[in-house]
């Protein structure tokens, strides 16, 4: 399983808002042990900048990061933002079969 560096930053931010920096650091450290962090580099940023099918730059970054690590599917809260994806896109409930 891969997540993007951007997802790591978002997770840290959300936990900090709900709890403490110490807890956020603890949970992000655990996540780092459980998943692979996908590569996000200048090429990914260039692809996202050129992607006219995305209205949200962050979504474009996530998408091209997924393509870059040869992801076979994506899990997101914003399925509608990935309607042009060549990778199957699921929300968490769909992915877990709930």
Image: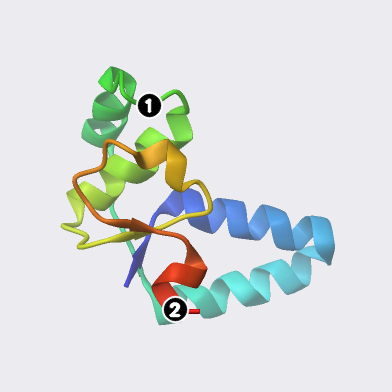
Asked if 27 appears above or below 67 in the picture, the reply is: below
In percent of width and height, residue 38 lies at 31, 57
Asked if 37 appears above or below 96 in the picture, the reply is: above
User: Residue 96 got which mark?
Assistant: 2
Q: Nearer the viewer, residue 92 or 5?
A: 92
Image quadrant of residue 41? top left
Instruction: Provide the residue designation for mark 1.
Output: 54
Would residue 2 appear left or right of 70 to someone viewing this image? right
Asked if 95 appears above or below 86 in the picture, the reply is: below
Secondary structure state at the residue bearing disc 1: loop
Secondary structure state at the residue bearing disc 2: helix
In percent of width and height, residue 62 lies at 38, 44
In percent of width and height, residue 98 lies at 50, 79
Is mark 2 in CB contact (under 8 Å) with mark 1? Answer: no
Give neighbour class at mark 2: few <14, some 14-19, many 20+ (Cα, 10 Å).
few
User: Residue 44 got which mark?
Assistant: none
Image quarter (top left, top right, bottom left or bottom right) of the N terminus: bottom left
The mark nearer the N terminus, 2 or 1, is: 1
Would residue 66 appear left or right of 60 to someone viewing this image? left
Image quadrant of residue 20? bottom right
Q: Disc 2 and disc 1: Cα gap in Å?
A: 26 Å
């Amino acid at each position: 399983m891969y997540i993007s560096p951007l997802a790591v930053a978002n997770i840290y931010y959300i936990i900090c808002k709900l709890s403490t920096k110490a807890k956020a650091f603890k949970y992000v450290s655990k996540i780092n042990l459980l998943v692979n962090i996908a590569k996000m580099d200048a090429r990914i940023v260039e692809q996202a900048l050129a992607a006219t099918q995305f209205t949200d730059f962050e979504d474009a970054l996530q998408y091209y990061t997924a393509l870059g690590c040869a992801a076979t599917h994506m899990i997101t809260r914003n399925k509608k933002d990935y309607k042009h994806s060549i990778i199957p896109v699921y929300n968490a409930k769909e992915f877990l079969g709930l």
